[in-house]
Each structure stands twice: as structure tokens, then as C-alpha cells.
Amino acid sequence: MARQRYVVCRADALPEGKGESFEVAGHRVALFNVGGSFYAIEDRCSHADAPMADGHVCEAGRRVACPWHGAEFDLRTGEALTPPACEGIAAYPTQVDGDEVVIEI
Ligand code: FES
């Protein structure tokens, strides 16, 4: 199925270093602002379904740590980097278009 573009929010609505959860086309998406760059991943940890938007962002590594048990995920790919998660989660192409954050699902 072809990907579609969706406007998620205004770029200035999400402070740097923070994540926020959005419902986009039936998907729970965690959107992060990391030093002015935006990343979108599935808002569900593969270990026990924690909300990843509440996770701790590590700017240097472009990683986010799960808020419940600390598994880290790559914000660019959704790859699980540390236990206890062993499966990756979805990552969505993200760009800023004008003053809006757009993702592809
Ligand atoms: S729910 Fe994320 S590491 Fe356990």
C-alpha cells in the first residue's frame, strides 16, 4: 500500500527534547523534536506496550529510552538497541514543510 502524507502538528508546538503522542490515520505515533529535527515512531514499546512519547530522549545518539523499563530505540529506524525490547517498532519518514510537521504512513 502506498504511503500517504499527514500533517501532525505545527513545528513550533513541540519543544526541543520532548515527545508527544498523536493519533494519525489510525496509528498511535510518538513524535519527537531532537535539536530541531523531528522523528516519528510507533507510540508503543515492543516489550510491554509503554507509550514511547513519554520516553527519555538522548540527543547525541538519536535514541529514545522507554519510560517503563528503559529499552532504547533508534529514532530514525525504530530498531531496538537495548534489552528488554528485542523487536523493533515502526518509524515513519518525517519532514518539516513550511511550519508544519508532516509524516508518511
Ligand atoms: S515496556 Fe518498554 S522496555 Fe518494557
Image (cartoon, grey):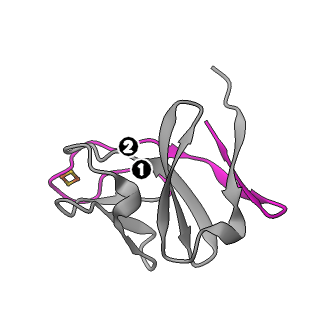
Relative to 35, 63 lies left or right: left
Dot 2 beta carbon under 8 Å from ligand 1: no
Q: Are marks 2 and 1 in contact (CB under 8 Å)?
A: yes
| Residue drawn where x is 84% and y is 62% of the image | 98
Provide the major secondary structure of the magenta segment.
loop
Front-most of 48 and 77?
48
Relative to 82, 73 lies left or right: right
Q: Position of residue 88 (x, y in %)?
A: 33, 44
* Image: magenta residue range: 76-105
Question: Can you say whether 2 is above or below 7 in the image?
Answer: above
Q: Position of residue 24 (x, y in %)?
A: 58, 39
Whether the magenta-drawn stretch holds residue 84 is answered as yes
The local secondary structure at tag 2 comes to: loop
Q: Residue tagged by mark 2?
A: 89
The residue carrying pointer 2 sits among few (fewer than 14), some (14 to 19) or many (20 or more) residues within 10 Å by Cα, namely many
**Cα gap from disc 2 to disc 1, whole angstroms:** 5 Å
Q: Assign the C terminus to one quadrant of the image.
A: top right
| Residue drawn where x is 19% and y is 44% of the image | 48
Relative to 27, 55 lies left or right: left
Q: Amino acid at mark 2?
A: Ile
Q: Amino acid at mark 1?
A: Gly
Front-most of 71 and 17?
17
Q: Earlier in the sequence, mark 2 or mark 1?
A: 1
Q: Position of residue 49 (x, y in %)?
A: 26, 43
| Residue drawn where x is 48% and y is 71% of the image | 18
Question: Can you say whether 104 is above or below 25 in the image?
Answer: below
Whether the magenta-drawn stretch holds residue 77 is answered as yes
Q: Residue tagged by mark 1?
A: 78
Q: Assign the N terminus to one quadrant of the image.
A: top right
